[in-house]
Amino acid sequence: MKHRMGTRAAAITAIGAIAVGGLAACSSSDGGSEGSDTLRVTLANHVWTDIIKEKIPDFEEETGLKVELTQLGEDQLSDQYNVKLNAGTDEIDVMMYRPLQEGKLFAQNGYLADLTDRVEGAEDWDWSDFQSGPVSTTMYEDRVMGVPLITESEVLYYRTDLLEAAGLEVPTTLDDLETAAKTISEANPGVAGFVARTGRSAAVTQFSSYLFSFGGDFMDGEKATIDTPEAIEAYEYYGRMLNQYGPDNVSTDMSWPEAAAIFAQGQAAFYTDASSLYQNLALPENSTVSEQLGYAPFPEGPDGSKPYNIPAWGLGINEGSSNQDNAWKFIEWATSFDTVLSVQEQGVPGARQSVWEDPAGTSSFPPALAEAIAANGKNGIGHDRPLVVNVAEAREIVGDPIVVGITGGDVATSAEEGQTKFQAFLDDENQ
């Protein structure tokens, strides 16, 4: 029987917006020899880190190892990795990293150790229990480079009162969503049928679920694919939803705080965004519609329901570490069923499917949200942006047709122009 560790706590503030703590401890120059009982672990400032820090004494007692922890903000973390990993440092053993932002770069540069044999050989730990979406993004060229830690997916938030007044069921397809948004917006002047991110770069992640569900993607290998019929249809749909049923005079620079605020202030019927943002809508102090808040899985498109289900953070081993066996012991412990369950009980969503199927694993989430996240985990896609090294530039390119659609422009032409730019970008990056 699997042992449950830890205690339940109140659900946490939106994960994507959290930055906590400071530098907990600095790495030292000792402990770098092979098989050393001192393990240097570098983690990001995150609520997951705060929870796991409290459990590290248990790990030390179980293994006889001593953990030297360095905890840094995201910018500091990136700066340290850029300097130390590029220099081939052996001063980092375990490293917390962002698979979608840094995974490809770190793998290409040889910063991450290949974990394939370790994960496949750890039978009791059970690599097959990890959701396929997050797993796909912690791999590179069929090799496992990291283990997913923290996940999020795109869900449908909705106003239960507006649906009830309109006599509508919760939309299960994108066609149903458009019909409901149109019906409610026409019956309720001043209330938008739909709201979502509109900024060129910011909207890319949330648009991705629409793209996948229409049967498209940003790229196929080294080939850009944003001008396929499926992609154009997705761009047109997303743009039309905001152009025709979105807030009056909708801006084209909204990220999640602005879009969430519109919904939380009762000014929209439907909102699709990250599952991790739910407390911005669910807590009475943040929302005027907390009592009317509903949650549902991402609706089905022509190719089914294919929301992103991503690993926001993962754990890897520094290829330059001479203490890799002990580094793996830490990762194996930190991502075990017991630890993931304990952390998820405190509101941090993990990547183990079995934890989502355990009542204790969903106890800190609203039941309907937990069901939506679990459903997304079974059919989710492991990326929400192009998997490239220069993510920021790529997002700007593939985000252009989103803005064109929102403003009622010619989406097909914009997608064709974007295809040319994005292919040139990929050709340059893959030289």
Image (cartoon, rainbow, N blue to C red):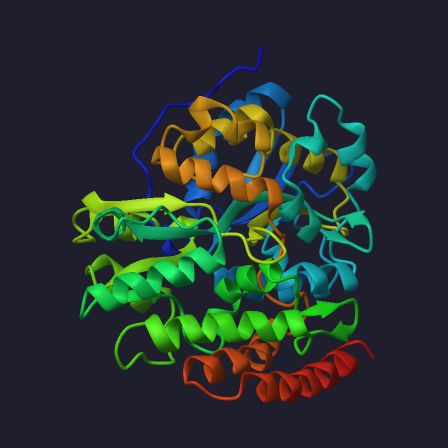
Q: In front here: 389 or 222? A: 222
Residue 245 location (% of width, % of height): 33, 71
| Residue 197 visible here | yes
Q: In front here: 136 or 84? A: 136
Q: Residue at x 52, y 64 (%)?
A: 205
Q: In front here: 355 or 159? A: 159
Q: Image quarter for residue 262? A: bottom left
- Left or right: 196, with 119 as reference point: left
Q: Residue at x 49, y 49 (%)?
A: 152
| Residue 28 visible here | no
In this rendering, the answer to whether 368 lies above or below 338 is below
In this rendering, the answer to whether 163 lies above or below 402 is above
Q: Quadrant of the N terminus?
A: top right
Residue 4 location (% of width, % of height): 49, 18
Total marks in image: 0
Residue 26 location (% of width, % of height): 52, 49
Q: Residue at x 21, y 48 (%)?
A: 161
Q: Quadrant of the C terminus?
A: bottom right
Residue 371 location (% of width, % of height): 45, 36
Q: In front here: 315 or 381? A: 381
- Left or right: 93, with 237 as reference point: right
Q: Residue furthest front?
A: 167
Q: Residue at x 80, y 41 (%)?
A: 116
